[in-house]
Image (tube, grey):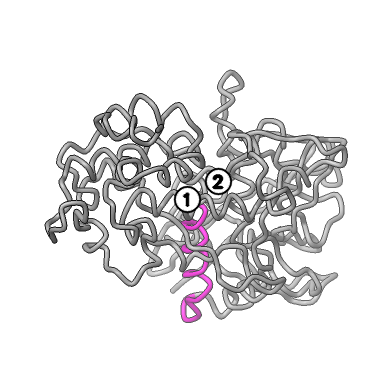
Amino acid sequence: MASSSFDLLPQSIITSSILQFLQSRDWLSFRLASRSCYVAVHGTSDVFHAVGSESNKSDDDCLEATDEKNGESTPLKKELLSESESLWKFALVRDYGFEHAPNNSNGNNNNNSGDDQFYHSIRSPEDTNDETPFLRTSDVFKAPTAFSSWKHWRKIDRRIHSTRNPAAFIPRGERVVGPYFLRAASLWKKIEQWCENESSYKSIGREIQSSLLPGRGLDPNLLTSDGGEYDAAISALKAVYSFYSGQDGDSLRLGGLFGGSSAYDYLSCSRFEYPRFENDEFRVIVTKDIYNDGGKVFFMNTVTGQVFVQVGDICRPATPSKAEDAKNCRDSLLRWFEEHANRLAIGYYYVQEYRPSQYPSIRMISQFPTELDPVHCSRAVTNGVEVVASSLFVPGKQFSMAGGIFFFFFRLGF
């Protein structure tokens, strides 16, 4: 009897005044009540529409499903598709952290730039094992419908929380944030492209890429020894580590992903660390100096999401933040990684070979500022001789009572 009652209601009433007050996963059960309920959820009675990108149908076939109720092979009414698309966009906003966008009145989901975000998603690898990354940058795709996009985000969410009962409800604060994962995919794609550019970077990129460990899904319940739960503060952490989860640190001759500097007998190089959660201090180590136990460390505060850099007793935020704006800290790790990826992409860093007195020679990304940073690097040409000079402050009480020292880098060209 319930299904016949719903059959009498306009679809707009069902989608805007009933379904939005239910959990999105309950819509999947609701759609089975009757043909009208199915149409309310998917905008069509064609069951292949729900299969989305996994079906043999093309994207146009999905968007122009037939109205089987009338037995005619006509394009799906735009208003039905629009109502269904709006419903699943609402689900993406509520469940997976997408931003609200202006309603698309013409029902065309592929050509509206404001709605474009809803259709970008990530496929999960078919074969999963210890050698397979949790996610790959090559698996980012544009879904044909908002439901198809939501379905892929739900699959990623369930995989991250695979240690829980499959029927268990995942609180909203612990779910994946889709836009964070897309940003993580974009920054890792830039890093991959830099690593593959052997001609420009003396093959060090290939060495760094081969040292990267497969990405891992980080379940919030596993982040603390007492079984506590974190909210959106670790959303960026889950996104970044889903693609790669650190570097293999067996060889000191291998440069770290974040580079370093060297002068005289001093050598520093930062490696991307496998996530180590220090529960007593509510932080996770992101990078660590390969050569110095008390050297530079970047870590993320698991309560706020803010990234900090620490050398000895000196600790300061690694990204701009506002203490009164908690949301500003949540993507701190992403902003910090994005800045590094962007600098690699534009050639901001040199690759240098250092020969410190106490270590074998090593090629690595140099953190000394280059000409692309005119504030911290100077360049002059006199009588055909080019001189490039920059400085880098290295904190540490071992250098001076002032807590650090400036190293200078010079390069001559003719």
The spot of residue 122 in percent (x, y) is 47, 59
Q: What amino acid is labelled 1 in the image?
A: Arg
**In the displayed structure, does residue 93 sit left or right of residue 312?**
left
Relative depth, front residue between 224 and 85: 85
Can you give x and y, in whole percent of width and height, for residue 166 in the image? Answer: 67, 50
Q: Residue at x 15, y 41 (%)?
A: 106
Residue 194 magenta? yes
| Amino acid type, callout 2 | Leu
Q: Which residue is mark 1?
A: 183
The magenta stretch is 183-200
Quarter of the image with the N terminus is top left
Give yes or no for residue 204 being in the magenta stretch: no
Q: Residue at x 60, y 76 (%)?
A: 204
Figure quadrant of residue 169: top right
Q: Total number of numbered labels?
A: 2
Residue receiving disc 2: 334
CB under 8 Å between discs 1 and 2: yes
Q: Position of residue 48 (x, y in %)?
A: 34, 62
Residue 90 in the image, given as x and y percentages of width and height? 38, 35
Within 10 angstroms of label 2, few (less than 14), some, or many (20 or more) residues? Answer: many
Taking the view exactly as shown, the residue that stands out farthest to the front is: 1
Q: Nearer the viewer, residue 182 or 6?
A: 6
Residue furthest to the top in view is 324
Question: Which one is in front, 272 or 349?
Answer: 272
